[in-house]
Amino acid sequence: EVQLVESGGGLVQPGASLKLSCVASGFTFSDYWMSWVRQTPGKTMEWIGDIKYDGSYTNYAPSLKNRFTISRDNAKSTLYLQMSNVRSEDTATYYCTRDGVGAPFDYWGQGVMVTVSS
Amino acid sequence: DVVLTQTPSTLSATIGQSVSISCRSSQSLLDSAGNTYLYWYLQRPGQSPQLLIYLVSNLGSGVPNRFSGSGSGTDFTLKISGVEAEDLGVYYCMQATHAPWTFGGGTKLELK
């Protein structure tokens, strides 16, 4: 069974940094591109970016590219999202997703909440 | 960025009723290779989204065949032929033809 389990969320102050993790199981992690997607409190969905199966290439939404960094450790089957200089508008639930064959986001984690507030 | 507009924003249905959701794109989603990267997801209350339809009209793994997708270019439709209680939630369309990938605003399906 495919499982994606996110962690690392919580309450952070504006301007701070935060690193989210996602541990994958139930499939060969190193065979798949992976993505991060976030959902605002108003339920708007936004693709953050993705990373190639070997970690050699990343894509980002242009609006987030300068502050967010996606990385992975295939030995640990773990995906990461490094968030820097966070803003109130980054308050959202962050989902780790797998990019399947023929379909992005074929599996989703349970999500982790990030609240940016002073 | 490509804007996906879903209508209606809320849909009230009775069990067994057939319903349709529209997703219109600000640009054609047909790429130069002839592929159309349009997807549908369902987020049930309190759950993470799940893949329903990929590449316009293909059912995701384990998705019941009462769901169907159609469309081309800029106009796409998700149809549910006989709503069941487990179908309630918010439906999102998503495009991956043009970077950055974008989602529609969602359509909430509720019981009448």
Image (cartoon, coloured by chain):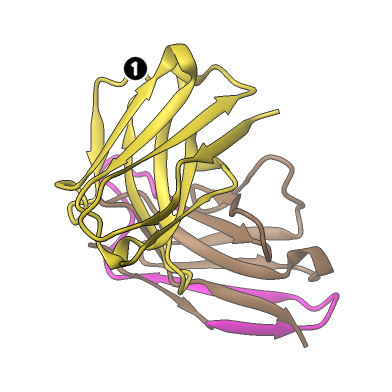
Chain colours: A yellow, B brown
Image coordinates for residue B22, horizontal then vertical, percent: 51, 74
Q: Residue furthest bottom?
A: B112
Q: Position of residue A74 (x, y in %)?
A: 42, 16
Q: Quadrant of residue B103?
A: bottom left
In the rendered structure, the answer to whether residue B95 lies left or right of residue A27 reads: left
Q: Residue furthest left?
A: A66
Query: The numbered mark 1 sits on a residue in which chain?
Result: A
Q: Residues within 10 Å of mark 1 (few under 14, many from 20)?
A: some
User: What's the residue at 64%, 23% (across, down)?
Assistant: A26
Start and end of the magenta stretch? B9-38
The answer to which of B64 and A86 lies nearer the viewer is A86
**Quadrant (top left, top right, bottom left, bottom right) of the C terminus of chain B:** bottom right
Q: Is residue A38 visible?
A: yes
Residue drawn at (52%, 64%), measured in percent from left and top? Answer: B92
Whether residue A80 is situated above or below residue A116 in the rendered picture: above
Percent x, y for residue B102? 35, 58
Residue to which mark 1 is pinned: A54
Question: Of A54 and A89, which appears nearest the observer?
Answer: A89
Q: Residue at x 25, y 61 (%)?
A: A14
Q: Main secondary structure of the magenta part?
A: loop
> Magenta span has B34?
yes
Amino acid type, callout 1: Asp
What residue is rendered at 67% in x and 69% in y?
B89
Residue A84 falls within the magenta-colored stretch: no
